[in-house]
Image (tube, rainbow, N blue to C red):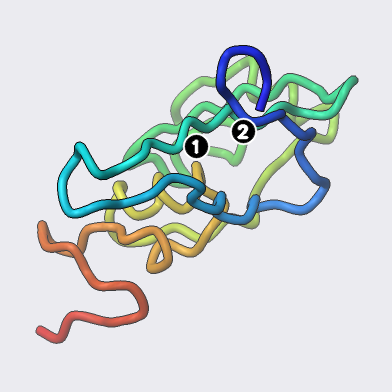
Amino acid sequence: MNDDGHREVTPLSDVLPLPDPRFHGRIGSTYVDSEADIISLPMPPAGAPNVLLVLLDDVGFGQTSTFGGPANTPTLQRLANEGLRYNRFHTTALCSPTRAALLSGRNHHSVHALHEGREAPLGTQLLQ
């Protein structure tokens, strides 16, 4: 623990997604009997690049000019012309699970993404 009560921060690894942090608190019968786990945010390694993620819902490859679509995206087009094209990402039929998978780096089933307004338990599929 450091001076402000937080555990020491270790740099992120080169492997993503990061493992779930281990809970170091104590869960009692009531809040009085419990002890909080004060965690620190993970820190990137020294010299790591800044990354800006732009997520647009309901926009497929065919929408932007970068991939031949009608929506003019000059900055994205300029980046693509310089060789930066991301085109190997799996999307789901809904925006919420896709966003959850992208932001967590995990499969959308693993992050308890909603299915038609109901939470699907981990590792299960809801039958219609």
Q: CA distance from mark 1 to mark 2?
A: 7 Å
Residue hosting label 1: 69
Residue at x 31% of width, y 47% of height = 95
Q: How many marks?
A: 2
Could you say which is closer to the camera, residue 12 or residue 38? 38
In percent of width and height, residue 78 lies at 73, 20
Callout 1 environment at 10 Å: few (<14), some (14 to 19), or many (20+)? Answer: few
Q: Is residue 74 above or below residue 80?
A: above
| Quadrant housing residue 111 | bottom left
Residue hosting label 2: 66
In percent of width and height, residue 97 lies at 34, 54
Task: Say what amino acid the circle numbered 1 marks.
Answer: Gly
Q: Is residue 33 left or right of residue 14?
A: left
Q: Is residue 122 above or below residue 74?
A: below
Contact between marks 1 and 2 (CB within 8 A): the answer is yes
Q: Is residue 63 left or right of residue 115?
A: right
Please give the label number shown on residue 28.
none
Question: Outermost residue toward the front?
Answer: 33
Could you say which is closer to the camera, residue 76 or residue 26? 26
Residue at x 48% of width, y 50% of height = 23
Q: Is residue 10 left or right of residue 123?
A: right
Task: Say what amino acid the circle numbered 2 marks.
Answer: Thr
Quarter of the rendering occupied by the N terminus: top right
In percent of width and height, residue 63 lies at 44, 38
Secondary structure found at label 1: loop
Secondary structure found at label 2: helix
Quarter of the rendering occupied by the C terminus: bottom left
Residue at x 49% of width, y 64% of height = 107
Could you say which is closer to the camera, residue 61 or residue 49? 49
Could you say which is closer to the camera, residue 91 or residue 1? 1
Q: Is residue 118 above or below residue 13?
A: below
Question: Outermost residue toward the right?
Answer: 47
